[in-house]
Amino acid sequence: MPAPILQVEGLTKTYSGKQVVKGISFDVKKGETFGILGPNGAGKTTTLEMIETLRPIDGGQAVINGADVAKDPQAIRYMIGVQTQSTAFMDKVKLTELLEQQAAAYGERINPLELLRQVNLDSQADSYIENLSGGQKQRFSIAAALVHKPKVFFLDEPTTGLDPQARRRLWDLIKKVKSQGMTVILTTHYMEEAEMLCDRVAIMDEGRIVAMDTPQNLIRQLLKRGFKKARKVEQADLEDVFIDLTGKELHS
Amino acid sequence: MKWLILLAAIVLIRLAFRFKLLGRRSGGEASRPSDAQKPLPPWRRSLFTVGVFAKVSIKRYFRDRVAIFFTVLFPLIFLFVFGSLGKNNNVSFHIGLINQSGTAFAQKFVSNTKASGTFKIDSTVTNLSQAKAKMSRSEIDATLVLPPSFGEIGHSGYPSGQAIIYFDENSAQAAQTLQSVIQGQFENINSSLIKIKPPLSVISQSTNTQGLSKLDYTVSGLIGFSIIGLGIFGPVNYFPLMKRQGVLRRLHITPLRVWQFFVSSVLSNAVIGLFSIAIMIAVASSPLFHFKITGNYLELGVFLVLSILTIFGIGLAIGGWAKNENQAAPLANIIVFPMLFLSGTFFPRYVMPLWLQHVTDFLPLTPIIDGIRMISTEGKHLTDIGPQLGLMGLWAVIIYAIAFRVFRWE
């Protein structure tokens, strides 16, 4: 069994007297895709931001690949990649230039075209970010987060606001990144997304982890408790119909 | 010579590209960072980072038409407005001249006055009622009337008479000036008629040193205005926007240091600033305005870069501190507008009360405006403006200490 690349122990965060993250602990193994699920306000984003060095850690500890997040944030920054919101890129700058700049922040030179090819945006190399579609922007922000080949890749609700085709393309991309051996940690509202992508998920509610296992095990445990769906499950749903009719490969 | 500053700007842009070369040389060791757990980038990698960031913002600027409008065309509009105001510097009076006398002396006086060009004589005025109507509309400032007996040979054997100047209440000052000019002419004639040398006399003589013309003053002030616009209002608008969009948050996740971000911003600002100032100086030096730089272009360029560095720090501090536009804009206005008016940008500081001059001596913009004037119009060298450079240096240290302390990525 591979050693955990991320260890989180008793993490807490308090905003103006209210504890929003209440002592969270979990490990993520190397190469694993780990999902954090939960309703809005559960503390998912705050937890990620503490691990990403963006928010001070109030209590507990987070260690990535042996480096303590609170003690050595600069070492952590070299090891992690974070997919940011798609507006986080300056307008009137070409995609290639944005990637060169992002890499320069790590003191590195890269071949931006090569990276754009990996996310199927090489035809847009000279475009500005404001001329891309929503799905293209998301894919670009993944490319930007991976310029320095990080060890751990964080995505915060990567497919929120995307249409079904764009979502599926993004899932394919995340799977591709995962298949290259990257450790991926993502938050999401969409359960089918978690089921499709994640090896293990943690379900958060009100600042605590209420369950943590593989998606299959969590479903099995629920069924064991005698759960029955109210509606008979069909072999396909409306989204499958939509994708079948509109196609997924045609749209970029 | 005129384009030396533009040349300096181009050299700076080239320098930004040079960092690429630096990066390429260190590229071998840098290409596999995942092997090193905690890479310690050498100084060249740090500079490479700074260079790429500066290069990207300079490129971005030249694609941004709105930014170019505000940094290049906007100061030019001011130049045209202030420059054409300054042109009417040697005002000449418009007067009416009514000669009621038929004497040879009066006719000669009229033709001499017309020929001298001291006054602009409105030839359509032939009688007093026309003159009064024109004066009431301020079309002419005063009316000189030579009465019928003017220039007749008197008892003394010389031409004599009394000219009358008519004026209305809103041109009393013009009438007074006109009177003293005519008086002076009469005295000349008098002394040529009666050969005596008056015991007291006064003449004026030029010292042949160049003073500040109104246009010189305007252009130096406008350069200061450009530096303020670009160095303060630029980042004050742009930084909160980058925070709102999450651009700075994204950079915060990377190992990019605040100082690298600051240095790259200063670099790009200096290049853009020199570019816009070079265009303004070029336009001001054109035959339209005849502005002339007497000092050394290279020294002016160096001084401008230091000025931009100092002033940009203020914008960096405000924009870096502010969480949003609503915080940034009022603070910038509170700092900029008093400074703009108190540092001698648009009118000279010597018109202020003495105590205010002493206070405004120490504003950060004052040594900049003074320095630009001393180099560009008085031909001084950097070594002559030690006090100005010292004060700017002191301000730069204070400003950047504050900017580093208050900077927020989000």
Image (cartoon, rainbow, N blue to C red):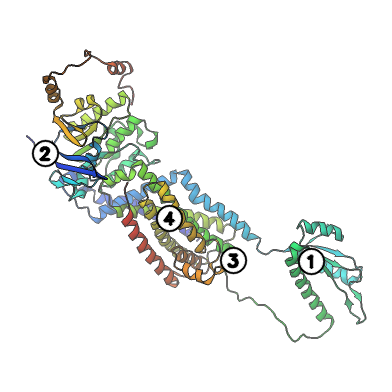
The residue under label 4 is B9
Q: Nearer the viewer, mark 4 or mark 2?
A: 2
Chain bearing mark 4 = B
**Depth check, front residue: A105 or B96:** B96
**Towards the viewer: A114 or A35:** A35
Q: Nearer the viewer, residue B113 or B410?
A: B410
Position above or below: B402 against A234: below
Residue type (three-letter) at the residue carrying disc 3 = Ser
- Give me the C-alpha separation between circle 4 and circle 2: 52 Å
Looking at the rendered structure, whether the residues under marks 4 and 2 are on a common chain is answered as no
State if disc 4 and disc 3 touch (CB < 8 Å).
no
Q: Which mark is residue A4?
A: 2
x, y percent for residue B190: 82, 79
Q: Chain of mark 2?
A: A
Residue that mark 1 sits on = B115
Residue A193 quadrant: top left
